[in-house]
Image: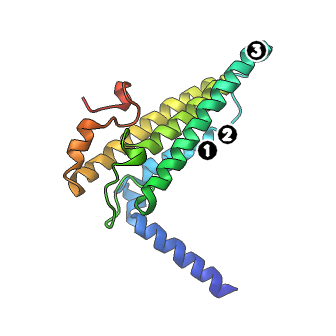
Amino acid sequence: MRLNKSNHIKNIKTVLSRWGFSKQGLLKNSKGEWYLFSQILLILLHFIPPYPKIENTEFAINTFFVVIGLTKSIQGLIIVIKAFLDLGENLTPLPYPMNESTLIKNNSYKNVRHPLYKGLLFISLGICIFSLSLIHLCLLILLAYILKIKALKEEESLKIKFPEYKKYIKEVPAIIKHIKYLDWRY
């Protein structure tokens, strides 16, 4: 039993190392570790109850927002799952490509450079809509801010590792097309 636990810990350490995690990086944010932790915290905060809680709304209005919000969240979840699958072995939670990674520009990545972030923002927007919560609106804005910083850091590394990425940036929207803050091609 003890040997098995030791193997699991070694496997976890191997995966974390492969992704680029290190003790030094955790202390100095050398590969964007702090952005990842901020992202995780903001995602987890989406589970807090809505505030202010709106009561006594008409059933039709409430139902409308619930349906729209759930639809947007489900759309975001589908985008996230597809982007995860499309990345395959290239997936890393840090905004820094792995040494053995390849550049993915097809499937989910054909029409947007950061579909995972787009999906996360759609999920957050959906939660904001169906909960009608100011706190969740703030979480959406903060998540957009962190994801943009993380994407820009990631793109710095991708331009160095893959020279063709510079052309890809000019042709493909970053996160959400036509929203200047989330599409910095221009």
Q: Are marks 1 and 2 in contact (CB under 8 Å)?
A: yes
Residue type marked 1: Leu
Instruction: Indicate which disc, 3 or 1, sits on the residue closer to the N terminus.
Output: 1
Residue type marked 3: Ala
Crowding near the residue tagged with mark 2, few <14, some 14–19, many ≥20 C-alpha atoms within 10 Å: few
Residues 184 and 106: in front is: 106
Residue type marked 2: Phe
Please say if 54 is above or below 44: above
- Between circles 3 and 1, the one closer to the viewer is 3
**In the image, residue 97 lies at what x, y percent?**
34, 58
Crowding near the residue tagged with mark 1, few <14, some 14–19, many ≥20 C-alpha atoms within 10 Å: few
Q: CA distance from mark 3 to mark 2?
A: 25 Å
Q: CA distance from mark 3 to mark 1?
A: 30 Å
Residues 38 and 61: in front is: 61
Q: Which residue is mark 1?
A: 44
Crowding near the residue tagged with mark 3, few <14, some 14–19, many ≥20 C-alpha atoms within 10 Å: few
Q: Which residue is mark 3?
A: 60
Q: Which corner quadrant of the image does residue 144 belong to?
A: top left
Per the image, label 2 sits on a secondary structure element best described as loop
Q: Which residue is mark 2?
A: 47
**In the image, residue 106 lies at what x, y percent?**
36, 48
Residue at 67% over, 39% down: 47
Q: CA distance from mark 1 to mark 2?
A: 6 Å
